[in-house]
Image (spheres, rainbow, N blue to C red):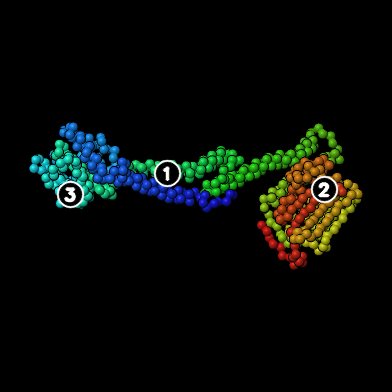
């Protein structure tokens, strides 16, 4: 499994991405706020508040001279609506106008809460006490308007008073008809927030949307692609394809999930292959068993039907010979069935083993004694070698003898007359090696891996026609039940060799205590 890297963890990347997104949005919002507020504080034309007031007052004086019925509000918005710096226009006749009324502080002339007082010739507005001065209420034009200077120049308002603004008079035909007031200080925060709130809100939403898209592309998209791959692999596995695998790139939690899925898919593939092999072996076993059982059954039925023929004229000797064949085939059938049942018990773990110290010399003696008549008849010599002489194996004496007898019978059957069979026993560490060798023709190399299979049909020179065909399979099952191994190979100078590796026993043979192993 690829090693998981902590900084590639999906949870870690989500947490860091969330914090980074919030930080980026806050920083961008702050920069936008500072930029917007700077536009209100600093005029694009680089005019000071007094210069702006004089400029607007001159423009309005000229416009009112040309058109006394001028729409003041429309004119101000048309001419000065693009200026970020706010100002207010207050006329003697009560008219008021501003380029940005929402930014003017509360109580500012012409702004929210601003007020004027009627004058002696009609509605009065506050006026300055003098050029550039404010009245006791902080509004210019608090008293009667001053006479314009003889040269007709406009007087600029001054800084001072609680209003915190500068002003410039609007003069028409030598008479002051109003004034222009410009805040001398930046607008209050509340005013800026009220004015800039919609802009900041929409910009924040846009930043959040862009950040969410960027975060999804950088954090979730790679994981999403691998999750899609895992989903497709899971669907394919559900459809029966055990060879599919998910991508294990990334080093995060998705990688761990993909690795677990791939391991599960590999296990399922191995099990499916094992089931397929098992099913094939079962089919082959049924075919082999049917064939092996059919041979003696066919012979028995044929001879019985012959003996039962009404017109058969057979003497007593012929009948006896037929009955002897039937008896032999019956014994063969019983042997096959018995070996099958025995093999099923051994491979299925059924039955019990009496574990004790078994002398190897005793096993070899029983083999020689049982096959003595056959060995003498065919003049086959048996060479026995045990090192050390008191060598013992740990196991069930009956089952170990059964295995050794099957191997010895197979070796004797394929040893030519005046040949030799060797029985060797030696200790190798915590194991005992028991070897049975014959001087026959050996086993063809292509058949060596299969000699322990049930009913395996080897080369005719190694035919098992004299047995049930299950002897070597029973040997392997017995040895494996004892925790050992058995192999078949060919000797360099000819003949076949069967080697058994069994656990050694250091128990005293006389005082050994059998242990029942289920």
Which label belongs to residue 211? 1
> Residue 217 at x, y = what percent?
47, 42
In the image, which is nearer the foreground, mark 2 or mark 3? 3
Considering the numbered disc 3 on the image, is that residue within a helix, a strand or a loop?
Answer: loop
* Among numbered discs 1 and 3, the one appearing first in the sequence: 3
Image-based side of 161 in relation to 356, left or right: left
The residue beneath circle 3 is: 134
What's the residue at 74%, 50% (across, down)? Answer: 476
Left or right: 28 as drawn, with respect to 278 = left
Q: CA–CA distance between discs 2 and 3?
A: 125 Å
Q: Are marks 2 and 1 in contact (CB under 8 Å)?
A: no
Q: Are marks 1 and 3 in contact (CB under 8 Å)?
A: no
Whichever of callouts 2 and 3 sits on the residue coming sooner in the sequence is 3
Tell me the CA gap for discs 1 and 3.
Answer: 51 Å
Local secondary structure at mark 1: helix
Give how far across and how far down residue 343 sits, in percent.
71, 49
């Amino acid at each position: 499994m690829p090693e998981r890297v902590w900084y590639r963890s999906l949870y870690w990347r989500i947490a860091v991405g969330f914090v980074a997104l919030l930080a980026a949005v806050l920083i961008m919002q702050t920069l936008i706020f500072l930029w917007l507020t700077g536009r209100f504080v600093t005029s694009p034309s680089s005019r000071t508040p007094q210069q702006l007031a004089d400029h607007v007052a001159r423009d309005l004086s000229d416009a009112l001279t040309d058109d006394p019925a001028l729409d003041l509000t429309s004119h101000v918005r048309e001419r000065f609506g693009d200026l970020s710096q706010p100002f207010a226009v207050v006329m003697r006749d009560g008219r008021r106008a501003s380029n940005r009324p929402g930014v003017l502080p509360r109580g500012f002339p012409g702004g929210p809460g601003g007020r004027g007082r009627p004058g002696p010739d009609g509605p009065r507005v506050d006026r300055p006490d003098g050029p550039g001065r404010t009245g006791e209420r902080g509004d210019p034009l608090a008293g009667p308007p001053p006479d314009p200077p003889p040269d007709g120049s406009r007087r600029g308002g001054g800084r001072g008073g609680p209003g915190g603004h500068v002003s410039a008079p609007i003069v028409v035909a030598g008479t002051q008809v109003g004034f222009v007031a410009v805040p001398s200080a930046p607008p209050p925060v509340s005013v800026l927030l009220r004015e800039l709130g919609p802009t900041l809100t929409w910009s924040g939403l846009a930043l959040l949307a862009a950040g969410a898209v960027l975060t999804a592309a950088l954090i979730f998209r790679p994981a999403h692609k691998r999750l899609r791959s895992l989903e497709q692999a899971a669907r394919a596995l559900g459809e029966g394809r055990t060879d599919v695998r998910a991508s294990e790139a990334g080093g995060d939690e998705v990688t761990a999930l993909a690795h677990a899925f791939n391991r599960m898919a590999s296990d399922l593939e191995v099990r499916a292959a094992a089931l397929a092999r098992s099913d094939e072996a079962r089919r082959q076993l049924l075919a082999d068993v049917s064939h092996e059982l059919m041979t003696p059954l066919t012979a028995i039925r044929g001879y019985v039907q012959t003996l039962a023929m009404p017109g058969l004229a057979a003497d007593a000797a012929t009948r006896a010979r037929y009955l002897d064949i039937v008896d032999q085939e019956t014994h063969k059938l019983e042997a096959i069935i018995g070996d099958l049942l025995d093999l099923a018990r051994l491979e299925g773990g059924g039955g019990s083993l009496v574990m004790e110290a078994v002398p190897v010399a005793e096993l070899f003696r029983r083999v020689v004694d049982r096959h003595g008549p056959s060995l003498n008849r065919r003049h086959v010599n048996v060479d026995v070698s045990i090192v050390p002489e008191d060598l013992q194996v740990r196991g069930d004496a009956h089952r170990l003898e059964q295995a050794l007898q099957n191997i010895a019978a197979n070796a004797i059957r394929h040893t030519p007359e005046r040949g030799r069979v060797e029985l060797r026993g030696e200790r190798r560490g915590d194991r005992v090696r028991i070897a049975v060798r014959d001087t026959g023709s050996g086993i063809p190399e292509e058949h060596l891996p299969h000699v322990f299979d049930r009913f395996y049909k080897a080369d005719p020179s190694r035919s098992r026609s004299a047995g049930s065909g299950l002897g070597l399979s029973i040997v392997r099952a017995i040895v494996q039940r004892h925790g050992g191994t058995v192999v078949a190979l060919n000797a360099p100078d000819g003949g076949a060799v069967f080697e058994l590796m069994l656990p050694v026993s250091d128990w005293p043979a006389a005082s050994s205590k059998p242990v029942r192993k289920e």
